[in-house]
Image (cartoon, rainbow, N blue to C red):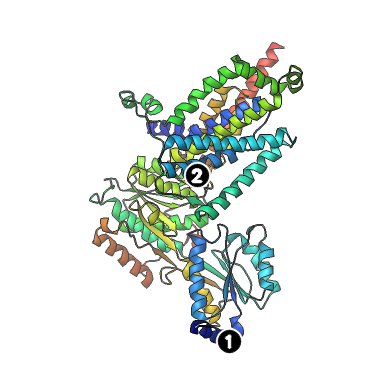
Amino acid sequence: MIDPLIHAALLMTTPILLAAIGGLVNRVGGIVNIGLESMMLTGALVAVIVSADTGSVVLALLAALVAGGIVGLLMSLVVTRLAANEIIVGLGFSVAVAGLVRFLLKSVYGVSGTFNPPGVVMLPRIDIPVIADVPILGAILSGQDPLTWFAWAMVPVTAFVLARTRLGLRLRAAGSAEMTARALGLDPLASRDASTVFAGAMSGLAGAHLSIGVVGLFNEGITGGRGFIALAAFYFGRNRPWRTALGALLFGFFEALQIRLQGRGVPAELVQMLPYLIVILVLTGLGLANRRRSGSSS
Amino acid sequence: MNSASVLALALGATSAAKAADAPAALIIAQGGLGDQSYNDLAYEGFKKAVAAAKIEGKPVESKDVVAQAADILRRASDAGFGLLVDLEYSHGEALATVAKDYPDTKYVILNQVQPGANVASVLFQEQEGSYLAGALAALVTTDTSIPGINDKPIIGVIGGTKSVGIDKFIVGYIQGAHDVNPNVEVKVAYSNNFGDPAIGLQMAKAMYDEGADIVYQVAGGTGIGVIQAAKETGHYAIGVDTDQDGLAPGSVLTSMLKRTDVAVETVVGDYAGDTFPGGKTVTLGLKENGVALSDMKYTKDKIPAATLAKVDELKAKILSGDIKVWNAVDQGYPDFFK
């Protein structure tokens, strides 16, 4: 009972975590990315197409990464060079990409809704001998796909790069002190664009995880609002990678839990509220704790 | 000019003489023609019916089907069609409003009831088809000679949302399962989403983990994930609405079909024959061939003949009225499913 739950929780965390790290970096660079969903959707579709055409998971992931990055770049250019409102542009991209995907599926592949080409190769699961048989630990470490490993590896990497490297410093400067950065001869808009490309690439991978990591086909609803959950996760994490990861994990865990709580006497409607309710509760708790701390220090 | 088109011309001339034979239009729902599903199926029935009735018929597709409901309906009504069959569920209220302004035009809406003397509503008895699906699943789940079946008498069903329209399927499924074997446990869960296959896959896997080996899905795109889960874990799913057996050959035990083609064919035929059921609700069940189980092209060979015969026997009992399948929409919730 507990092992499948843990395994499912991690599996459902991965796409949210990937997109949330991308969104976090993007926000540090000065853009709140509402369009993560569109980049996920692009990555999900491209991964299925390339996986089915080439039979190569590596190529599929690369293609999803590049495609997500391109959508990110386009969105970023509209925001940074045309000074458009990032919220409106982000929402616009989410709607436009969804429409474009539907159009492409219909005009190129002659299908609507679901695209299930033959020969889609899925991400492999990495089984670790010995550890696989240890309860709980085995469920956490063994049988995960490479993208899950990558997503969690990116958490310390992102923390390190943002806090300790020149690149991170420049990005933070671009986000929080654009004028100062410019006065120092930096190009904050270029940093900002780079951060959106990164967010797009990570979201593209998140989409690929859903389509060739979990389901093995593409469906126009496959992202299921996870781009917006990722948004909540990095807001929850306040731009801190580990806290953002915790936010993503909370969603993943309670989503996996609510599935297993259904049909056990608790009304389905209440169980389904659980992931969202918990996040609101945790946010409230953290807010109260922060207030108490700042209250006592002043 | 070849003889076929001469014949067509001649037929056109004779049919134009009758008042009821103004051309018919089929308003295509979201997803559009080419969806290999709901719309395509309905269009097939439409083409068959207009050919048989020798009237003119045309599909109407538009870019923004949902937002422009009243617009589309008014334009089509102005265009001189005598019959408008609307496949788009969200057009219901707009259709009732527009129908009032065009008393000489006839309208058909599916899966809901709308008022108006010139409006016919078509409902499907989904609970009857679901009953057979449940009965089949309950028979199969205890038969360990079938590959992929464990010794636990557990089956499952995943609905897209907790609502009476979905529970109508679920109640029929449970009733069918318990009628053949009261000891079969039916797990019920809702995905709260009709388009998220990843959730569907996880939910189905959770049910398979707990001993279920057959899971019925009534959840649109989410259900595609249920079928994937069946394929991945070597268990069975049951498809819904259209024939989904081919989505994962061998892993979809059967599909509970809603014969939209039969529905459209029936109403267009009635229209041409001057027996249009205006102001009435047409219900299509097993008897009218409006709902049915699929042909089980990929699974039939795995299932013992006696099991299939038992399902046919139950079908005959429903047709004869010996078995009454609970309709949650009309009758509310039964004691066995609250």
**Dot 2: chain letter:** A
Label 1 vs label 2, nearer the camera: 1
Q: Which residue is mark 2?
A: A268
Q: Amino acid at mark 2?
A: Ala
Q: Is residue B275 or residue B294 the one in the foreground? A: B294
**How many angstroms separate mark 1 from mark 2 (CA)?**
59 Å
Q: Give the residue furthest to the front.
A: B1
Horizontal side, residue B62 vs residue B216: left or right: right
User: SS at mark 2?
Assistant: helix
Q: Give the residue furthest to the left.
A: B145
Res. B13 mark: 1
Q: Residue at x 44, y 55 (%)?
A: B170
Q: Residue at x 53, y 39 (%)?
A: A43
Q: Position of residue A266 (x, y in %)?
A: 48, 41
Crowding around mark 1 (Cα neighbors within 10 Å: few <14, some 14 to 19, many 20+) is: few
User: SS at mark 1?
Assistant: helix
Q: Quadrant of residue B117?
A: bottom right
Q: Is residue B317 or residue A141 the one in the foreground? A: A141
